[in-house]
């Protein structure tokens, strides 16, 4: 004779409504619709986790955007120093290859040097032309080639500042603009190198 199994309320065991026949080796349940299987507390926790994950993703995206904008700004500032150096070197290359223009730039009217001085100036103009191309090469990779802007600041720009300062102290007051220009270039180039070094570290 078959023994009837006790009837229990499944809601007491798994949190859903239904009828369960419990036995030592048998367990059958009459379950409701699948949507009723969801535990409300578990679903609430899952929704909170999803919202937290979404919020964290948005914040991370905003942080990345902020960092990228900062890096783009720094890269722009770094390149400014290179282009200022390119402009200054190109200007001096032209001036050194043209004695009359050189005289106008340094405040010596009707400057007409002898052949030996012209040759020395031509050597300087050639070197300035080469340095212009060096900076043009470096500006393509301003972070990796940052050492170029550093050695442009010192000794090149710093040396020009000393020469202009000596001329100014000797009475050539027209050199004041060269002192101002080289001072600005030196500060901008050193700052550019520091920014490039920091960006390389990150």
Image (spheres, rainbow, N blue to C red):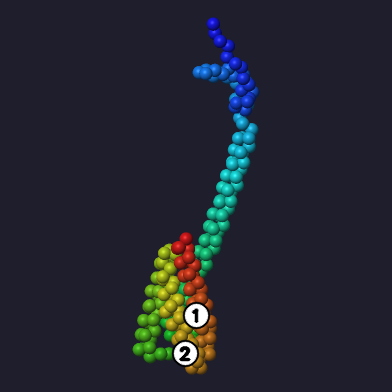
Locate residue 155: give its quadrant: bottom left
Q: Which mark is residue 166?
A: 2
- In the rendered image, residue 113, in percent from the top left (x then y), is placed at 41, 90
Residue with the mark numbered 1: 182
- Is label 2 in a helix, a strand or a loop? helix
Asked whether 186 or 36 is in front, the reply is 36
Q: Which residue appears at 47% of the width and 90% of the height? A: 167
Q: Quick check: 172 above or below 137?
A: below
Q: Quick check: 180 above or below 149?
A: below
- Is label 1 in a helix, a strand or a loop? helix
Q: Which mark is residue 167?
A: none
Mark 1 to mark 2: distance in Å? 14 Å
- In the rendered image, residue 109, in percent from the top left (x then y), is placed at 49, 90
Asked whether 142 or 15 is in front, the reply is 15
Asked whether 70 or 124 is in front, the reply is 70
Q: Which residue appears at 59% of the width and 19% of the height? A: 20
Note whether residue 166 is visible: yes
- In the rendered image, residue 91, in percent from the top left (x then y), is placed at 46, 77
Q: Quick check: 185 above or below 18?
A: below
Q: Which residue appears at 64% of the width and 23% of the height? A: 17
């Amino acid at each position: 004779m078959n023994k009837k199994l006790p009837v229990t309320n499944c809601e007491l065991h798994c949190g859903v409504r239904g009828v369960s026949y419990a036995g030592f080796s048998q367990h059958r349940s009459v379950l409701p619709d699948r949507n009723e299987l969801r535990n409300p507390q578990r679903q609430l926790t899952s929704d909170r986790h999803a919202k937290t994950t979404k919020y964290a993703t948005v914040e991370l995206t905003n942080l990345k955007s902020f960092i990228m904008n900062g890096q783009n700004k720094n890269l722009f500032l770094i390149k400014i120093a290179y282009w200022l150096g390119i402009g200054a070197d190109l200007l001096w290359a032209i001036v050194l290859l043209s004695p009359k223009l050189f005289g106008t730039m340094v405040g010596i009217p009707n400057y007409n040097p002898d052949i030996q001085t012209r040759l020395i100036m031509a050597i300087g103009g050639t070197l300035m032309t080469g340095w212009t191309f060096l900076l043009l090469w470096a500006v393509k990779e301003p972070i990796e080639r940052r050492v170029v802007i550093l050695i442009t600041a010192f000794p090149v720009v710093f040396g020009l500042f000393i020469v202009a300062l000596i001329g100014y102290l000797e009475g050539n007051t027209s050199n004041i603009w060269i002192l101002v220009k080289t001072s600005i270039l030196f500060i901008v180039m050193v700052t550019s190198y520091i920014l490039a070094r920091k960006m390389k570290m990150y």
